[in-house]
Image: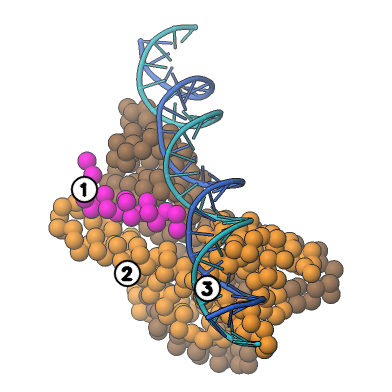
Chain colours: A orange, B brown, C cyan, D blue
DNA sequence: CCGTCATTTCAAAAACTTCTGAAATTCATT
DNA sequence: AATGAATTTCAGAAGTTTTTGAAATGACGG
């Protein structure tokens, strides 16, 4: 049912899961669905991975919370079938968005809150460090928001420009931001 | 010894730690060092956080493995003192580099290996999906490598361009990649 | 080369996460 | 309403990670 190639890919995703902040089974389920030609139902996943039915159910639920899988109902079959978006770029966009939501947004909120509530000169150095961090995160997430607006085709074109883009930047920097070296 | 502001920041980093793939104590130690005006020794960290001496020792070791802290020896004091880089951009560069090393590079290696070892037409769909994924990761990491070469000042200028950059890209796309729509 | 202070290692305890099988729930069909 | 297939929930077992105190190691000054 599962080729050696698939098997090895699935096991790798299971192992990497812990580094990616998901658990082994979730990683394996996603890897399986990612490689599969057509959507699979829960029992097929159980058969392919050799884990319990309930574990598969929970893993699918977690993947849905991540918005990473798509539910499909096949003609004349009561069972739910699950698949991944066919377009890899959509997967990347979802992953980045969800990680930002979980790993960055709560901290940005907290930093803003701390800046507001601190009675100013109470603890000047810490206050300054927090402001600096908040500004940096806002710069990065602002850039991300801009890039995220681009259609995939343009985004890919931009990424492929790589080195060539640096010429543009060089010009733009000299032209529009001649001496803004007070960043750090 | 520790202001309310610092306290709250430290607790937040501790809580976020698990989402960021580090543990609570490591997060708290980093937060403390990040805010501190001058480098701290292990016992000061113990006093500030109320965790065991050995836990602090292990957390510092982990932060050193991440290359996120700097050891400093003060005049006439045998104890090691630890601090974070003063330049936040250096911290961001280290974080991105280390996460790439842990979370992406092993998978890229594995994908290349799987593409080599698969006897071609064995499992065409899975093979194609893996190639697609490998190409996408290479595009993204290649772009990252280019950006990472930029000096901070230029990188900041680029990030601040945001929306304005899209005009350049629009032009560049039309000029140099007129009909490359076979990406997905 | 001894005593003292600083740091690291380690094995076991505590805390936490993941996984399972059994029971409960849902829901389309009869 | 009763049936039965699919799915979810849940309490506890299994597994993993984190934290600790105690002992070992290292390192400096006398």
| Chain designation of label 3 | A
Q: Which residue is mark 3?
A: A64
Q: Is residue B127 magenta?
A: no
Indicate the position of residue B113 as horizontal and vertical percent values: 75, 62
Front-most of residues A107 and A7: A7
Residue B100 occupies quadrant: bottom right
Indicate the position of residue B2 as horizontal and vertical percent values: 23, 44
Q: Crowding at label 3, few (<14), some or many (≥20) Cα neighbours within 10 Å?
A: some
* Cα–Cα span, label 2 and label 3: 45 Å
Q: Crowding at label 2, few (<14), some or many (≥20) Cα neighbours within 10 Å?
A: few
Residue A42 occupies quadrant: bottom right
Q: Secondary structure at mark 1?
A: loop
Badge 3 vs badge 1, beta-carbon distance below 8 Å: no
Above or below for A95 versus A77: above
Residue plotted at (40% across, 45% down): B25
| Chain designation of label 2 | A
In the drawing, does residue A67 fall left or right of residue A45?
left
Work out which quarter of the rendered image holds the N terminus of chain A and state it. bottom right
Q: Secondary structure at mark 3?
A: helix
Q: Is residue B135 visible?
A: no
Rendered image: mark on residue A180: 2
The magenta segment: B1-19
Residue B48 occupies quadrant: top left
Q: Is residue A74 visible?
A: yes
């Amino acid at each position: 049912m599962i080729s050696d190639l698939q098997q090895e890919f699935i096991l790798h995703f299971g192992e990497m899961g812990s580094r990616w902040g998901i658990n082994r089974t979730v990683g394996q389920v996603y890897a399986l669905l990612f490689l599969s030609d057509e959507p699979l139902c829960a029992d097929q996943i159980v058969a392919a991975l050799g884990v319990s039915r309930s574990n598969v159910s929970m893993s699918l639920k977690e993947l849905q919370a991540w918005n990473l899988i798509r539910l499909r109902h096949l003609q004349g079959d009561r069972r739910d079938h699950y698949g991944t978006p066919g377009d890899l770029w959509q997967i990347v966009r979802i992953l980045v968005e969800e990680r930002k939501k979980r790993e960055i947004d709560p901290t940005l909120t907290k930093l803003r809150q701390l800046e507001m509530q601190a009675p100013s000169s109470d603890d000047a150095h810490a206050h300054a460090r927090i402001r600096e961090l908040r500004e940096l995160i806002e710069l990065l997430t602002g850039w991300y928001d801009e890039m995220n607006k681009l259609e995939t085709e343009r985004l890919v074109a931009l990424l492929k420009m790589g080195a060539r883009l640096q010429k543009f930047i060089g010009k733009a920097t000299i032209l529009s931001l001649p001496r803004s070296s007070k960043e750090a």
